[in-house]
Amino acid sequence: MATKIDTVESRGKLKPRPAPYWHKLSSGCHVGFRKMTPASEGTWIAQAYDSATRKQTRRSLGAFDGLPAHQRYDAAKKSAEAWFAHVGMGGSTDVVTVREACARYVAHVRADRGDETADDIEARFARWVNSDVKLAPIVLPKLTRQHVEAWRRKLVKAPVLVNPHAKEPRTRDRAPASVNRDMTALRAALNHAHDEGAVTTDMAWRVALRPIENADGQRDAYLDREQRADLIDAAKADVGVFLRAMSLVPLRPGALASLTAASFDKRLGVLTIGKDKAGRDRKIKLPPQTAAFFAQQAKDKLPTASLLARADGKTWDKDAWKKPVKAAAKAAGLPDTVTAYAMRHSAITDLVTGGLDLLTVAQLSGTSVAMIERHYGHLRADHAAAALATLAL
């Protein structure tokens, strides 16, 4: 039997009991109020009837004790109606928060693309999402654009510590490209939750998490073959070997640094890339001269040894190669914008301008065709013009 629960006075007259008092909102949809003790503020529940399964489904709505008592029924009614709409559109009855959505996405990526990619995404969530007490606990159907935009503003304004081990470390603004990478991870997690039915609309983040345009800014300096050779010659021996490897195959520095002696198959002349943003191993068939270079690096090394180790035997990382590359660039009289990544950028540029199709360039580089088109597609203009010239009568 329905009970009046929409006023403070009516709820105050209710006898405490474990079972909720129900108020019908529409056919099969009720909002309930549970009062366990005389002094209790009470809690609210939504109940929906599924005609297909002939079962009742309930969702706890909370106490709404942050609102004045006379506003709690309206808040509970609004929350219940939002949940009814969610379920009515085929949404899951599971209670999934933003934090849980991120955890589920990490598990999905780990199973589909491997630990390396999953670990990177998980670290981003740990730093930027799970630590946000205003965003992480929100149940997905209650997530709004305002919630996501507030998170985005906080992300953009978060300072980056420069030289954290220095006596007086400095801070700088986060690079737009870094902000985009963190937003991409959250957007992917929310989209995955949407695909699973944990939420039935992406309105909360569709616009709020759009990437910053032109975030990559100017690409790394392009070095022609002579400049690349000068950079390699000016570098210390171990850095020079690392840079030469980058000039031979268009890999990311991190992917190159992670290669072991076992990554190179001397018999087949094949290099296996196992650590990259692509998330999966890929194999590159090398031309004889390039294969000979990598064979020399793998000579007399154990399979697990670093293929391109530093002089001290340690594995390369960005902190180890950054300053030596800058020093080599200065010694070679090259622009101060030159980085290790410039070798990859230059190699990709040469492949594109050399006429190699963009799909193959993308596969060799471990990136998407869309990314290659975005940053290097304009370099094909001359090839396109030449192709159009063949159509002339």
Image (cartoon, grey):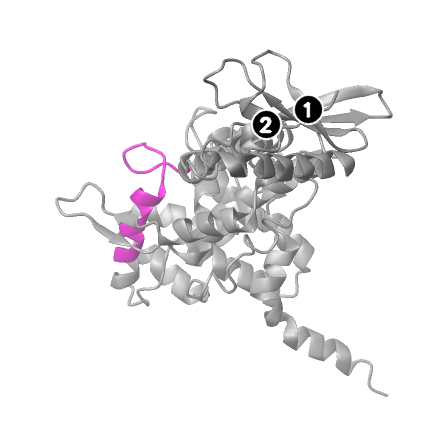
Question: Farthest residue toward the top?
Answer: 18
Mark 1 residue type: Thr
Q: Is residue 375 magenta?
A: no
Residue 183 location, x and y as percent?
51, 48
380 or 312, nearer to the observer: 380
Question: Farthest residue toward the left?
Answer: 167
Image-based side of 291 in relation to 268, left or right: left
Question: Circle 2 — which element?
Answer: helix
Residue 310 location, x and y as percent?
32, 38
Rendered position, 148 above or below 53: below
- The quarter holding residue 60 reads top right
Residue 189 location, x and y as percent?
59, 39
Question: Farthest residue toward the bottom?
Answer: 393
Image-based side of 203 in relation to 152, left or right: right
Q: Residues within 10 Å of mark 1 (few under 14, many from 20)?
A: some
Mark 2 residue type: Ser
Decide which of tag 2 and tag 1 comes sooner along the chain: 1
Q: Is residue 344 among the parts visible in the rendering?
A: yes
User: What label sits on residue 10 in the rendered view?
Assistant: 2
Magenta span covers which residues?
Answer: 308-327
Rendered position, 277 above or below 211: above
Pointer 1 residue: 3
Q: Is residue 282 among the parts visible in the rendering?
A: no
21 or 309, nearer to the observer: 21
